[in-house]
Amino acid sequence: AQKITQTQPGMFVQEKEAVTLDCTYDTSDQSYGLFWYKQPSSGEMIFLIYQGSYDEQNATEGRYSLNFQKARKSANLVISASQLGDSAMYFCAMREPWGNKLSFGAGTTVTVRA
Amino acid sequence: ETGVTQTPRHLVMGMTNKKSLKCEQHLGHNAMYWYKQSAKKPLELMFVYSLEERVENNSVPSRFSPECPNSSHLFLHLHTLQPEDSALYLCASSPTSLVRTDTQYFGPGTRLTVL
């Protein structure tokens, strides 16, 4: 069963503007971790940000922030002040407790326009 | 970022060939992973190694054979592959394989084409 849903296959954003990428997840566990990765055309998956299910504050890393709404099971990524180099595929992923598996969503392609 | 390296970056092989993919991590991690990324499909976990011991094998065909000689190196041996095995193969490592907070760090991938 699919556990991570990213409903936006592709998005366009103007340079210097903010963009929000949606991610919803499905789990019956109370303890889990949520991750966002960026994959440029070169192929490498670059770790961006992590949110633990027990973390009370939304995670932030530079221009990346995670809008975590546990009751709604959503973990949206916000990229502020978009740059041309932000053009890439973005993946939301979830890791359940004591497991080896990181489950990925289908990804969202972001294209930043000058 | 050169924490996880993969060679080769591109590989074209026939269905009767035998080849190997190599992954090396310089992060001092104890767990390593192989993922397959096919077009229009989410990443699929193939194998997990923890301290050189295989801890997960997600119903991967036997034509894919992993090897982990030490905690820094991971190989994926390929033989008699099918065209549908063409994909991007990503290696990752993490401090352990057990803790939900452990972040997996990925290599650049090997883009495999099977003719």
Image (cartoon, helix red, strand yellow):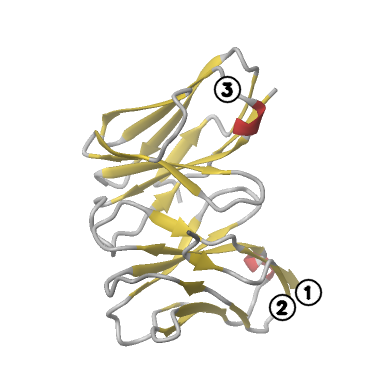
**Residue B35, relative to residue A82: is it above or below?**
above
Q: Nearer the viewer, residue A21 or A62?
A: A21
**Side of B84 where B6 appears, left or right:** left
Q: Nearer the viewer, residue A96 or B101?
A: A96
**Side of B60 where B87 appears, left or right:** right
The picture places residue B10, in percent across and down from the top left corner, at: 61, 31
Subunit of mark 3? B
Crowd rating for badge 1 (residues with CA inside 10 Å; few <14, some 14–19, many 20+)? few
**Residue A8, relative to residue B21: is it above or below?**
below
Q: Determine which residue is flagged by label 2.
A: A15
Identify the residue at image location x=68%, y=66%: A9
Identity of the residue furthest to the right in this view: A114
Identify the residue at image location x=42%, y=36%: B59
Q: Determine which residue is flagged by label 3.
A: B81
Label 2 to label 3: alpha-carbon separation:
43 Å
Crowd rating for badge 2 (residues with CA inside 10 Å; few <14, some 14–19, many 20+)? some
Image quarter where the C terminus of chain B lies is top right
Crowd rating for badge 3 (residues with CA inside 10 Å; few <14, some 14–19, many 20+)? many
